[in-house]
Amino acid sequence: MEEDIIEKLRERMESGKLKTTFRDVYYVSTAKEKSWQQIHRIEERKKDTTFTRNVVTQEEYEKTLAKVRERMGQLADN
């Protein structure tokens, strides 16, 4: 979408239908910079939220604990 707007402005400037001023260029430049910053912040937040903790059920925990106790018992017997 941003490229479409810029392309339309470029065409109007080249055809002489639009006369630009420094202020116009400044506003477009500022808008592009702000949109880049926003995209960058979104990407950073996306990286921060990708971490998920492994959640186990009580049953899985008890099975694992039983296996560990069994293995510890085997090691103690040796």
Image (cartoon, rainbow, N blue to C red):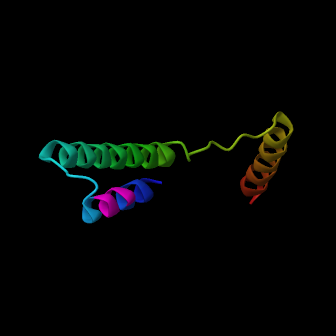
Q: How many marks?
A: 0
The residue at the point 41 percent across, 48 percent down is 39
Q: Is residue 20 left or right of residue 8?
A: left
Task: Tell me if residue 35 comes above or below residue 3 in the rendering.
Answer: above
- Which sits in the foreground, 6 or 51? 6
Single out the residue that lies furthest toward the left: 22
Q: Position of residue 59 (x, y in %)?
A: 86, 38
Looking at the rendering, in which quadrant would you find the C terminus? bottom right
The residue at the point 79 percent across, 46 percent down is 64
Could you tell me what secondary structure mostly forms the magenta stretch? helix
Q: Position of residue 52 (x, y in %)?
A: 61, 44
Q: Find the magenta span and give its range.
A: 8-12
- Which sits in the foreground, 30 or 36? 30
- Which sits in the foreground, 12 or 34? 12
Residue 58 in which image quadrant: top right
Task: Tell me if residue 35 comes above or below residue 15 in the rendering.
Answer: above
Q: Find out whether residue 9 is within the magenta segment.
A: yes
Q: Is residue 70 left or right of residue 48?
A: right
Q: Is residue 47 left or right of residue 77?
A: left
Residue 26 in which image quadrant: top left
Q: Position of residue 1 (x, y in %)?
A: 48, 54
- Which sits in the foreground, 24 or 78? 24
Single out the residue that lies furthest toward the top: 58
Q: Position of residue 63 (x, y in %)?
A: 84, 44
The residue at the point 24 percent across, 42 percent down is 27
The residue at the point 31 percent across, 49 percent down is 32
